Amino acid sequence: MLVASIQMSVVENDKNATIEKAIEKIHKARDADLILLPELWNIGFMSFERYVEEAEDKEGPTLSALREAAKELRVYLHTGSFGGK
C-alpha cells in the first residue's frame, strides 16, 4: 500500500480556494492508495472565530469535493479534521 500525506497551508479567508488547492494536491498524489489530509486544513487551525460559521454537514463543499476526487481517482482519502454540524 502506498500512502501519501499532504501538508498544506490555507488560502486565508477563502475556504473554496483552499478546497481547490487540496484537490490539486490530491491529484498530484494520485498514485497513492491512501491520501491523508491534515487537521483543520480547509479553514486553518488558528481560525477559531470561524469554526462555527464555517461548519458543514456531510453534503457541504468540503466532503462533496473530496468524495468526488476520491471516486474519480479511485483512492481512499483520510479527510483530516474540519468543523461539522
Image (tube, rainbow, N blue to C red):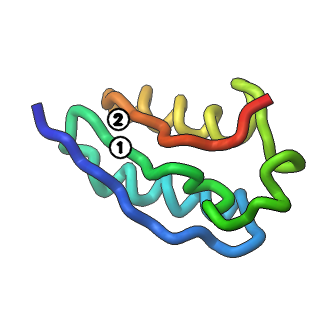
User: Which residue is situated farthest in the left direction here?
Assistant: 1
Compared with 7, 60 (above or below) is above
**N-term-proximal mark, 2 vs 1:** 1
Query: Which quadrant, please, contains the C terminus?
Result: top right
Residue 68 located left or right of residue 49: left
On the rendered image, what quadrant is the N terminus found in?
top left
Q: Is residue 24 above or below residue 65?
A: below
Extreme residue in the right direction: 53
Looking at the image, is 73 positioned above or below residue 15? above
Q: Nearer the viewer, mark 2 or mark 1?
A: 1
Using the image as rendered, state which of residue 50 and residue 60 is in the foreground.
50
* Residue of label 1: 36
Residue type highlighted by circle 2: Leu
List x then y, in percent, for residue 40.
59, 52
Q: Residue at horizontal 71%, vertical 41%?
A: 83
Residue assigned mark 2: 73
Q: Secondary structure at mark 1?
A: strand
Q: Residue at x 39, y 34 (%)?
A: 77
The answer to the question of whether label 2 and label 1 lie on touching residues, with beta carbons closer than 8 A, is no
What's the residue at 36%, 51% (across, down)?
27
- Looking at this view, name the residue that lies furthest to the bottom: 12
For disc 1, the neighbor class at 10 Å (few under 14, some 14 to 19, many from 20) is: some
Q: Disc 2 versus disc 1: distance between alpha carbons?
A: 14 Å
10 relative to 14 in the view: left or right: left
Mark 2 closeness class: few <14, some 14–19, many ≥20 residues within 10 Å: some
Q: Label 1 is placed on what type of residue?
A: Leu
* Image quadrant in which you'd find residue 70: top left
Query: Whole-percent x and y of residue 73?
Result: 35, 35
Q: Measured along the vertical axis of the image, is residue 80 above or below residue 13?
A: above
Name the residue at 27% across, 34% down: 34
Residue 29: image location, x then y, percent: 27, 51
